[in-house]
Every structure is written in C-alpha cells, then in structure tokens.
Image (tube, rainbow, N blue to C red):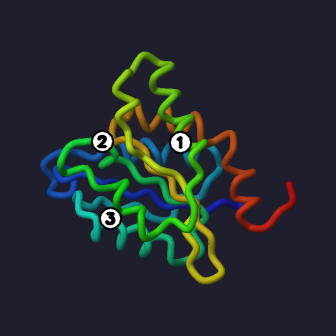
Amino acid sequence: MTIKAAVVTVSDRASTGEREDLSGPTAVRRLEEAGVQVLETVVVHDDVRVIAEAIQEVAYDEIDLVITTGGTGITPQDYTARAMDPLLRFDIPGIAEAIRYKGIEKGVPGALLSRGRAGVMVGGKNRTLIINLAGSVGAVEDGMDVIVPVLEHAVAQMRGADH
C-alpha cells in the first residue's frame, strides 16, 4: 500500500530561521524509513489560523497523513491543539494517549503536558489522518514508534477496508 504524507513543523523560531528545524526532518526520516512517501514539508509559526491553513494546503492533494511537530504544550503561544478544532471530523484519542504514555514510559514526565491530538480530517472524498507530535526530536521519535506499527492499518480503514 502506498501512503502519502506531509509534515508541518510549528515553531516561531524555526519559521523565522532563528533556529534549525530538527523535529520535522526527524519525522520525514522515520516516515520514509517506514516506506511512506513524504510529498511536502512546511514550517509555520504558532498561530491558529496559519497552522490550520497549512494543514489544509498540504492535505489538499489526497494526502493520507499529516504529521505536525511542535505547538502542543501549555505555553501561551502553543496553538496546535486549538488549530485542530475546525479541522478534525473526529478524534482518535488512543493514538494521542499512547504517544503521551510512550514519553512517560521513557522517563519524561512532561509528556503528560502535551495537548497533541490525533484524528481524521475529511475534505470532499479525501480522508486524512492528522497526528500532532511535540516539537523535540525525542518526542518525534517516540511518536513515530507508536504510529508506524498501526499506520498501514489506519490508512486502510480510512479508505474503507474491512476490519
């Protein structure tokens, strides 16, 4: 099965070139290692409208998966979770819960503070799985450890395959 993906990095500093984006390329690498075609990457600043528009733009051409990195915390400028409100037709809480648990299991108690979400966006006939990961390389690695084993099954289900 061919899975097409995009990665959106949400970071004020990376979007201005003040800091190198390391989390986005980590997500791309892990997806490609899993056989996923990453067709687009983008870096945006923390703004609800900008994040939502970027996800809609990259998902436009029948993208199966959008991974976001960053903006999932509880600081005043973390807006990724709020940007999901108008996009997600439904949440898949088990994915986000498993990602948080993976961080805790690895000794990162701050993983509990992530507001990252996972769910499905529906645009016309296209269904896109959106998964929010925290912005650190370690968090992306942990998230990909959770996502990759279930990714093919999830995409098949979104496409209408039987259980």
Query: In the rendered image, which quarter contains the N terminus?
Result: bottom right
Q: Which residue is mark 3?
A: 51
Q: Residue at x 52, y 52 (%)?
A: 118
Q: Is residue 18 left or right of residue 97?
A: left
Within the image, what quadrant is residue 55 found in?
bottom left
Query: In the rendered image, which quarter contains the C terminus?
Result: bottom right
Q: Residue furthest right?
A: 162
Q: Amino acid at mark 3?
A: Ile
Q: Is residue 49 left or right of residue 4?
A: left
Q: Residue furthest bottom?
A: 124
> In this rendering, is residue 161 above or below 153?
below
Reading the chain from its start, which is encountered first: label 3 or label 2? 3
Reading the chain from its start, which is encountered first: label 3 or label 1? 1
Q: Amino acid at mark 1?
A: Arg
Q: Amino acid at mark 2?
A: Gly
Q: Residue at x 63, y 44 (%)?
A: 34
Q: Is residue 66 left or right of residue 74?
A: right
Within the image, what quadrant is residue 150 found in?
top right
Q: Which residue is mark 2?
A: 73
